[in-house]
Amino acid sequence: MSRLVGTLVIAAATTLCACSQKEAAKPETTKVAQSGAAGAAAGSLGSFDPVAHVAVVHGKDFSFDAPDSISAGWTTFRFVNDGPSLHHLQIIRLDSGKTVADFGPAMEAMNKNHTPPPAWIVDAGGPNAPNPTGESNASINMQPGNYVLLCFVDIPNHVPHFTKGMIRPLKVTAATGTAASEPTADVTLGLADYAFNVQGQLTAGKHTFKVVNNGPQAHEVELFRLAPGKTMKDFNAFVQNAYAGKAEGPPPVDALGGIAAENPGTTEYFTADLIPGNYVLLCFVPDAKDGKAHIEHGMVKEFKVS
Ligand SMILES: [Cu+2]
C-alpha cells in the first residue's frame, strides 16, 4: 500500500518550515503509555476534550500519541506532526465487530493478493499531512465503534509507517453531553473519479473546506502550497529524484493538510489559511482498478491565491 507516494518524499528533505506550532492548552485527559525509554516528549500527549469535542493526536517517528477513547458526534481532530518525517492521520472504521487484531492480517492478505479491502474496513478520513512540526485538522461526525489510526506514509525505505508502529486503536463510545454542531464551510470540494470540483472563492485568508466524496471510489485531498517560482513539474521532478535517491535542496511545496481517504458518501471539514501563492489539490489514493495513484489519473487541481 503506497498511499501518499508523492507526499512521502517531502520528509526526505531536511528543511521544511514550521507553519503552525501553536498548541492551545487543553486538558490532557489521556496519558499515553510509552514503550520506549524516552517516553513522550512534554506537550506531545494525545487528549480528548469531551466538552469542546476536540481530539488531539500527535504523530512522530514512529508512533501516535492519541486518546484511547472518545465519544460520538461531530469531533475536531487536531493532528500535530512532531516529526522529523512526514506523517498523516488516516482514520479507519472497523465494522462487523472487527478489531485492530483483525486489521493486520486483512492488510497482509490485501497486499499479497492485490485485492480490495473487505467491506468492514471503512475509510473514515482524518487530517491529512501537514509539514513536519506543523499541524492539520479534520472535523468528522464520528459514529460509535472500533477504529484504527494509521500512517500510510512509507519513507524511509518504502516501509509504510503503520508497520513501524504508527497504528493505534481508537474506541468511539455513545454520544454524551452537548453535541458539537457541524461546521459551516465557505468552500466546497467535491471529490470524484478523477477530479476536484471547487465551489466558493479561494481567496487569501482562513477558509473552512467542506470535502464531499461523490465517489464511486474512496478519495482524499492533500493541499500543497508550491514554493515561490515552483510548478507541478518541479514537484514531479522532485518526487522522481527522491525515488532515485537524488533529492537535493528543500522540497518545492509546503504541506497544509486536507482530508485523508474517505469513503464515497462521506462529508468532512478542514480549515486552512491561504496566503498569496500557487496551490495544488492532490489525491494519492491507489485506484481500485489499476492500483495507480489517482494523481496519475489526473486527480490534480492547481489554483492561485492573489
Ligand atoms: Cu508516518
Image: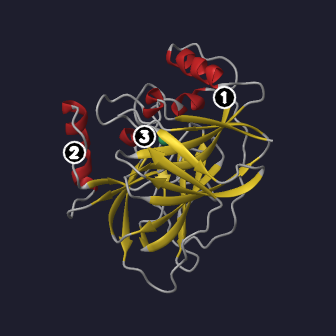
Please give the residue where the numbered disc 1 appears in the rendered image: 14
Please give the residue where the numbered disc 3 appears in the rendered image: 152
- Label located before the other in sequence (3 or 2): 2
Q: Amino acid at mark 2?
A: Ala
Quarter of the image for the N terminus: give it: top left
Q: Helix, strand, or loop for circle 2?
A: helix
Nearest to the observer: residue 304 or residue 23: 304
Q: Helix, strand, or loop for circle 1?
A: loop
Q: Mark 2, mark 1: which one is toward the viewer?
A: 2
The image shows a total of numbered marks equal to: 3
Q: Residue at x 24, y 53 (%)?
A: 101
Image coords of residue 185 (percent x, y): 62, 63
Is the CB atom of the residue marked by disc 3 within 8 angstroms of ligand 1's nearest atom?
Answer: yes
Q: Amino acid at mark 1?
A: Thr
Nearest to the observer: residue 162 or residue 231: 231
Q: Quadrant of residue 100?
A: bottom left
Nearest to the observer: residue 60 or residue 171: 171
Please give the residue where the numbered disc 2 appears in the rendered image: 106
Q: Helix, strand, or loop for circle 3?
A: loop
Above or below, 76 relative to 12: below
Q: Does the residue at mark 2 contact the one at mark 1 (Cβ under 8 Å)?
A: no
Direction from residue 159 to residue 17 in the image, left or right = right
Q: Mark 3, mark 1: which one is toward the viewer?
A: 3
Q: Is residue 61 visible?
A: no
Q: Amino acid at mark 3?
A: Phe
Quarter of the image for the C terminus: give it: top right
Image coords of residue 80 (percent x, y): 60, 52
Q: Is residue 258 visible?
A: yes
How crowded pointer 1 is (Cα within 10 Å; few <14, some 14-19, many 20+) is rated as some
- Label located before the other in sequence (3 or 1): 1
Image coords of residue 269 (percent x, y): 55, 59
Image coords of residue 138 (percent x, y): 54, 58
